[in-house]
Structures are given as C-alpha cells and as structure tokens.
Amino acid sequence: MIEEKKVLMIIAPKDFRDEEYQKPREVLERAGAKITVASKGVKVATGMLGATAQVDKDLNEASIAEFDAVVFVGGVGASVYFNDQTALKLAREAVEQGKVVGAICIAPSILANAGILQGKNATCFSSEAENLRVKGANYTGQAVTVDGNIVTANGPGAAQDFGQKILNLLGD
C-alpha cells in the first residue's frame, strides 16, 4: 500500500530546482505517500526559480530507518551535498537497507560520491556525467534510468517521470 510509504526528500538550503522538488512530490503525495523534507540549517529552503519549501527536519536528524525512500533533489544548490558526510552516509544506508533511492539533475553525483553507483546504470545532468563515469557508474544519458532500487534523472524535464518511477518502485 502506497499510503503507508514514507519518503524523505533532501533539498539544498538554497537553489534547489523547483520542478525537481515539486513534481515528484505531487506524484508521490497524490498516490498517498507521506513526504518529509530535510535540508541543512534552514527552516525554509528556497528554489532557483523562487519556490519555497518548508523543511521538516535538519539533515543531521534524518534517519533512513524511518523511510521507504530517499530522494535527492537537484538544482545548483545540490552541490552542497557532494562531499557532505551526512548526505553520503544517508545514501549508503538507504542502499544497504534496500530502500528506494532517487536523485535528479546534478544530485546523482551525491550517489556516485557515496560509492553506490559503481557498476550501476545511471543518468544525470550532463555536467556531472564524467563524475559518474569516474566513480564507476554506467552513464546512460537517458532522461530517467532505473537500476534495481536506484532511480536517476537528468533534469527538470524528467521530473514528472522521475516521480512516477519512484512511485512504481514503492508500489512493487
């Protein structure tokens, strides 16, 4: 039952990509999933295009055990998590615990830097493709790529489909 599913969406304190947060959230909430938003050091996060998002939890307080999925939202601000030990640890724990893991735009580099894309098919915004390859991912260049429980997408145009693919995995 999707109504029972809990999703942690991790967004940058500022300059997350509005659609990459809003569209997947809409898809998941419409299906009944419960969304918790985490960020670093803010109560309200601000998007690149001016959207705001209420932050429910500081990143340091997030525990993967409470959630069925974790989604890293893109936008230029997502780079704040590229080498953030807490974010990298959450990504690794999610995979170890068999959770659904999603990342869109430049955020798949968080997964690559956490070491969880090695040998996996993945996509991202073109600026991060080389980092994914260097970290052992098979870069597909597709709009959305699913490999096991990991969903990656290349940017705002793929946000709706990205949300749907996460929903599909949660429903299985």
Image: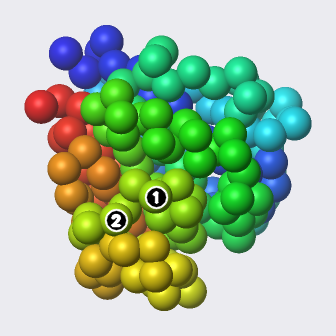
Residue type pointed to by label 1:
Gly
Question: 99 or 167, which lies in front?
Answer: 99
Q: Reply above or below: 19 against 98.
A: below
User: What crowding class fits label 1: few (fewer than 14 Cα within 10 Å), some (14-19), or many (20 or more)?
Assistant: some
Q: Can the viewer see residue 73 in this picture?
A: yes
Mark 2 near mark 1, Cβ–Cβ under 8 Å?
Answer: yes
Quickly name the residue at label 2. 118
Image quarter where the C terminus lies is: top left
User: On the picture, is 157 further left or further right than 13?
Assistant: left
Q: Is residue 164 visible?
A: no
Which of 172 and 139 lies nearest the eye of the viewer? 139
Inter-mark Cα distance, 2 to 1 = 6 Å
At mark 2, the secondary structure is loop
On screen, residue 127 versus residue 166, left or right, reads right
Quarter of the image for the N terminus: give it: top left
What residue is shown at x 68% (from left), y 39% (from top)?
Answer: 86
Q: What residue type is labelled 2?
A: Gln
Q: Where does residue 124 sit, x and y in percent of width and height?
A: 44, 74
Residue at the left extreme, as displayed: 172
Look at 87% across and 36% down and name the residue there: 41
| Residue under the point 52% across and 55% down | 114
Pinpoint residue 53: horizontal percent, then vertical percent. 72, 39
Q: Quadrant of residue 136?
A: bottom left
Residue drawn at x 26%, y 65% is: 120
Q: In this view, does 159 lie above or below 136?
A: above
Q: Observer-nearest residue: 160 or 97? A: 97
Q: How crowded is mark 2: few (under 14 residues within 10 Å), some or many (20 or more)?
A: some
- Give the side of residue 161 with respect to residue 25, left or right: left
Judged from the image, the secondary structure of the residue bearing numbered disc 1 is: loop
| Residue 145 spot, x, y in % from top left | 26, 66
| Residue to which mark 1 is pinned | 115
